[in-house]
Image: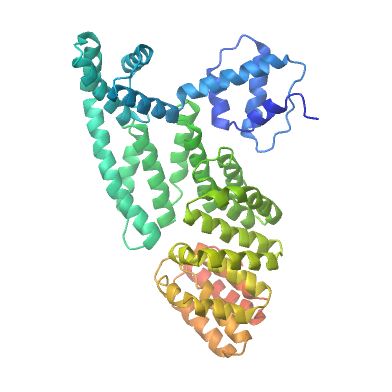
Amino acid sequence: MRPKLHAFDQFSKSLLPHETYYLLNSQQFADQDRLQILNTLHEHGRQIESTVPWDESIDKRKYSHLKNWIEERLKAIDVDEKLVWMNDMERKIMTDSIAPDDEKKLLSAIRRYRKPGFFFCKFYELVRTYRQFLLIRLRYKDHQVADQFISNFAPAYKLSQEVDEKMHVATKDIVSQYAQHDVESLQWEQWLEEVFYNEQIDGLNRYTALLRLTFIGLNYRKFDRLLEKFDHMDHIFQEGDFYSKRILSNYYANRLLIHSKFKEFDKAIYYGYLSLRWKNHDYIYYVNNLAAVLLRRQKNTEALQLMKAAYPVMKDTQNMYNKIGFVSFYLLCLNANQQYKSAENYAGTFFKAYKKEIIENRWHLFFTSYLETLLQQNKYTKVIQLIHQNHILELEKKNQDQPNYIPTIHWCYLVASFKEGYLKEKSMLSQMDTWLDATILEEGRINRILHLVEQLKPHVPKLYYRMYEKLKQKSISAGSGQRF
C-alpha cells in the first residue's frame, strides 16, 4: 500500500536545491501550513536522501495546490520554456497566425524587458521580426514599442553577436587542446573571465564562458580560480536567473568535476547525484562521471547499482562517445565487485557489436577496462591476442606525447608477455624503467601510475616495490608532496 503522500514525495525528489531556495525566497505565504510544506521540500531538495517526514495532519489538498504553485512558479522563470515560447511566437508571426492573446503577451514582454536575459539574442531577433509584421499592417503604436526596443538594445545585441563569434574561435582551440593536445588555449582565459562577469552580455554567452573556463582548467589542471566562479554562478541561480533544470544539471555535473580534482570526493558525489535528478541528453555522461568518483571512494557496490539503474537509458542513447564510456565504467564496476567473468562476457559482446565505433572513439578507456578484466583472471594469452589483433600498441604510440599519458596498455602487454614466457623479466623491467626515467611527472600523474602498478602487483610483485621506490624519488624531485 502506497503512503498517503507518495505522489508528492516523488515530486519532491525531482526538485533541485536551487529551485527550492528560490521558491522559499520568493514566496509570500500567509498560510503557515504551506510554508511548512515548502520548508520540508527545501530539506528534501538539498539532501540526497532526506529523512525529514511530511506532516500528514495537513490537509492533502494543500500539498496538491502547492505542487501546482511550484510548477507554475518555476515555469515562469525557466529560460528553456521561454525559448520554446519564442520559437512558437516566431512561427506564428512568420505564418500570420499569431492570436491577439499571444500579441498581448509579447508586447508586455517587450515593454518589461530591462537587461539582456539568457536567450537575449533570440528575443531580440523575435522582436525584429515582429516589428516588420506590425509595420506592414500600419500598427504604428505597437510598432513604436518594438522599434524602441530594437534601438535601445542594438548595442547589447551587437556585443553579444561579437562575443558569440569570438566564443566559437576560442572553443575550437579549447576543444582541440582537450581532445588532441595540439594547440594552446590558456590565452583565452582572461577574455572568458571578462565575458562571464559582464552583466551587459546575454546569459547564454556568460554561461558558455564558464563552461569554456572549466575546460581550460581541465586542460591545464588549474582549478583554484574556478570555484569562485562557480560560487558566483550559485548566487545567480539562487536569484532565479539563468534557470532551467537542464542548466542546473549541467552546473552540478561540472561541480562534480571540479571537486573531484580537489579530491573533495564527498562533495563531488553530492553534486553528481543532483545532476541525475533530471534526465537530459547528457544523462549518461553524468552517470559515467559519478560512477568514476564512486569507484575512487571505493563505493563499489553503489557504483555498480548506479550503472545498472542507468543501463536502459544507455541502450537508447545514440551518442557513441557516452555509450562506450558507460560500458567502460560498467566493466570497471564489475571488476571492482569481483564479477570478472560477467565483465569479460559483456566486453566481448559489446566489442563484437561496436568494434569500429570503439576504435574511432574511446578505444583507450574501453581497452583499459577490458584488459583489467582479463588480467584479473590471469588470461595473459587473451590479453596479447586482443592487443595484437586490434593493433592497440600502434594506437597507443600516438598518445605517448600527450601530457597526461600513462602507459597502461603497454605495461599490461609487457606483463602478459612476461607471464607467458615471451619476454624476460629483465627486459620487461628495463622497458618500464626507460619510460619512467625519461618522463617528468607531477602529483596527479604519479597517483595514476601508482594505481597502475597496484593493479599489476599480483602478477609481478617485484614490479610494485621497484616502481614504488622510483616514484617516491620522482615525487621528491618534483616536490609534489605526495605521501608514500
Residue at image location 61% in from the left, 46% down from the top: 269
Kindly indicate the quadrant of the structure image that contains residue 380: bottom right
Asked whether residue 322 is in view, the answer is yes
Where is residue 389 shown, x and y percent of the image? 51, 78
Above or below: residue 319 compared with residue 473: above
Where is residue 301 shown, x and y percent of the image? 71, 54
Q: Quadrant of the C terminus?
A: bottom right
Q: Quadrant of the N terminus?
A: top right
Residue at image location 52% in from the left, 55% down from the top: 323
Q: Who is closer to the viewer here, 308 or 412?
A: 308
Where is residue 61 shown, x and y percent of the image? 69, 14
How many marks the image carries: the answer is 0
Above or below: residue 107 compared with residue 412: above
Where is residue 30 shown, x and y percent of the image? 61, 9
Asked whether residue 480 is in view, the answer is no
Q: Who is closer to the viewer here, 233 or 112?
A: 112
Above or below: residue 294 compared with residue 21: below
In the image, farthest residue toward the right: 1
Q: Answer left or right for 397 relative to 95.
A: right
Residue at image location 31% in from the left, 32% down from the top: 201
Above or below: residue 81 compared with residue 214: above
